Image (cartoon, coloured by chain):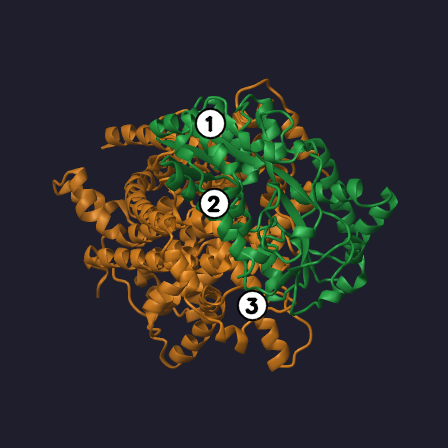
Amino acid sequence: MKKFVPFLLIMALSTTAWAGNPVAEEAKAEGKASFYANITAIEPIVEAFGEDTGVKGEYTRISTSKFLATVLTEFQAGKLMADVLQAPLPVMELLKEKGVLAPYRPAEADKYPEWASKDGVIQQFGIEYVGLIYNTELVKPEDAPKRYQDLADPKWKDRIVMANPASHATTISWLVGLKENVFESEAEWMDFVKGLAANRPMFVKSFGPTPAPIESGEKAIGISMPKYIITKAPAPLDWARLEQPLMGTPRGIAIAANAKHPNAAKLFMDYFLSQKSMNLLASKVGEYVLYPGVFPPIDGMDKAKVIPIRELSDEELAKWGAEFKRIFEMS
Amino acid sequence: MYAKRSTLTPTLIAIVGFLTVCPVAMLVIGSFSTNLGTLGGFTLEKYIQAYSDPELLDIIVNTLIFVVGSSFLATALALFLSYLNNRTDIPFKFMFRVISIIPMMIPHILFSVSWVLLLNPSNGIINLFLRQVLGMEGALNVYSLHGMILVEALLDLPIAYLIIAPAMASFDVALEESSRVCGGSSLRTLFRITLPVLRPAIMAAFILALVRSLASFAVPSVIGMPGRIYVLSTHIYRAVSTGFSADYGKAAALGMIVLASSITLIYLYRFMTREGEKYVTISSRGYRPTVIRLKGARYPLFAVVGLLSFILIVLPVLVLFYTSMVPYSMVPSAKAFSMMSWRHWIAVINDPISLLSLKNSVLLGVGGATLGIFLSIFVAYVIVKVRTKASGLLESLSFLSFSFPGIVIGVGFMWFFVQTPLYATIWALLIGYIATYLPYGVRPLASAFVQVHSHLEESSLVCGASRVQTMRRIVIPLLVPGIVSGWILMATMFVRELTLSVVLSRPGTEVLAVQILRFSEDGLWGRLSALGIIMIFISTGLVVLASWVGAIFKPIQEE
């Protein structure tokens, strides 16, 4: 509850006068803003947007693997229904390349780290952070990994779950990210990957199915997302506090080039980047956001170092996917 | 009469062709195009990449074992259950009918997850029971080809059952009696008379199960992937998920091998049942199905079937219910039972999108199945009774989008519908459903048509009835079991349809399966299970409705 008091205070203070904004008046006349996103469970933000601005927010959820196919199909047929789009940064970059996105830099963007808005088109607002999640009934905090290297310890043999490193793009990028950001040398990293493979982790399709085997005790630990500690409460989950940084793919947002509701689009993006939305995102969904001072209510997360990983091209992903498939199959 | 037939066939080819060829044609274009999904430069690169992969051979071998194994098991189980149910005096018949249809009502992903909870080697409930209560060593491992075959077979059981059961119901017992009179034993009669006469239905069930398991994704991803067993559908998934600019053209190129196999199977089936007259069992003379008395074997057999159904079907559903009551995935224990509550149910019932999707799915289930069956009657008629080259074409066409792997066909429909004003409307879903699942209506009806001798129609025509009257008064009543089966297959399929819906549904046209997928992507298994059970209730309602309406129109079947 203590954690909640300042949070509620911020919520109360941040109900800014959205109505005073000239864009807001135009947006109201347009009626609604259509939002395509791969991020999940953001209904509270869409609802709050409607209440605070009087413009209806319409949330269409599209999974990452279908995002580009869907948006490009609609765009090329001249039927793109989205006013605002949100997806992992690599997908947003591809959309920008195809001319789907329009430049727009909301005032709120100034509050974000400088690297989060390089081009004035895509605004990065969060990191899809990956962590080591364990079952607190099976693993004592002192036995949890302290460094990524610990996951290669044979004590974890047959006790790990992870998304398939041969095909899950985010996991592939994450493993490569470890090489580039965390490990001292490529040899040390390769030892880690081989050690992990030797522990015969169980593969699932994506991050979505990773927490279930951990919470049921089928597996003890997983390469998963700390946000599940929030969304799956009261499951016995905790994250391993590593001395190395956590990493993840940045999440980007932008408005569509030929949005049907151009002002509503801008208003929605302004609203989405506001402190109030980011607070909702962190507290309700456990997301790691880039708005300064806003953290998910996961113990110790405000002190964690979370860094974005480099975007890998599809060729690199395919190459590394094949490489990881080979390494993990050998064991 | 023949003039009518000759206009009927082309009309149907045009309708069915329009429904199924358009999305597949879009996929073919996509697979040869340098662009992502649209007309671009011509390239063979996607095919070369897809088929030069050295792993492909292993994957094809796995796929073969998986699809043949599961289809065989599904057909054998269906045959056993439908024989007991339709031909014997085994008690509590209605129960078997419901049980053999239940897997059709459960989203496949949920059914697979239930089996993982029951049979995973670490702490699967059955394994815990075997180890702790029976003191057995080792564990049964669901993450294996055996596990995949078992679960897929159970999921395909309703398809096989609903095709075989109508044929079994209209079996002319005189054939069996002749065999016995000539001194054949019961077993000999079964193998020499009963099964051969049912061959078209058995083959139809087997082939439909083959085609379905080839396209299946839930079992290969939930059970195969953790066991590192890859089949074609997970291989195709890998092609679209590795990398952010998913190339569905390449996935379509890979899907062509599945399509080609399915079409070959359908022609094979047609070839094997070419002498249609052999299988006619309802001719004009003395048709009456009778019941075989099991006598002393009645209750022991019931116990066997009861136990089988309990382990295979009731237990996974109980696991679902259990999952919907506990706060997170946990192994049953005193703690788990003390933490049970209705919270997931309340969350689902209070969710406006879940309610909207409920309404849309029921609408699509009832409306879609009714329209679909209407079309299927004509298609099945032409396929069975007008055995020309054109009717063979029609049969292949009806399978076209059905036999494409699910992940890919949805995108094909999206590429097609975006060119039309139907895009993002509920009509797109309706048309897509009927086009894709047409075989669910056509197959049961075709195996029912096979058994109706043309003498019956001819007698009616000779007596001065018009063709429409003949259809309504003579043919349709004899087809009622097939119509009911087909309607049930289609309606329950539409209520839980995922692969098309996930691509075509938009705000306002949400359907149940999409909502279920969202819960599963967020790992919210409790809500997922609650919604899954609501889905089972709705489908059960539809099955009861169909059976009830069927009973009204089925005077001839009553003794």
Disc 1 on helix, strand or loop?
helix
Q: Residues within 10 Å of mark 3 (few under 14, many from 20)?
A: many
- Total marks drawn? 3
Q: Chain of mark 3?
A: B
In the rendered image, residue B8, in percent from the top left (x then y), is placed at: 28, 31
Disc 3 on helix, strand or loop?
loop
Depth check, front residue: B239 or B488: B239
- Viewed as shown, does residue A56 lie left or right of B256? left
Amino acid tagged 1 = Glu
Q: Which residue is mark 2?
A: A13
Depth check, front residue: B120 or B468: B120
Q: Which residue is mark 3?
A: B330
| Quarter of the figure with residue B554 | bottom left
- Viewed as shown, does residue B67 lie left or right of B15? right
Asked whether disc 1 touches disc 2, contact meaning CB atoms under 8 Å apart, the reply is no
Specify the chain shown as green. Answer: A
In what quadrant of the picture does the N terminus of chain B appear? top left
The answer to whether marks 1 and 2 sit on the same chain is yes
Q: Residues within 10 Å of mark 2 (few under 14, many from 20)?
A: few
- Viewed as shown, does residue A256 lie left or right of B451? right
Amino acid tagged 2 = Leu
* Residue sitting at x 40%, y 49%: B512
* Rendered view: A167 above or below B253: below
- Tell which residue pokes out farthest to the top in this image: B41
Colour given to chain B in the rendered image: orange
Q: Chain of mark 2?
A: A
The answer to whether marks 2 and 3 sit on the same chain is no
Amino acid tagged 3 = Met
Q: Which residue is mark 1?
A: A74
* Residue sitting at x 35%, y 56%: B167
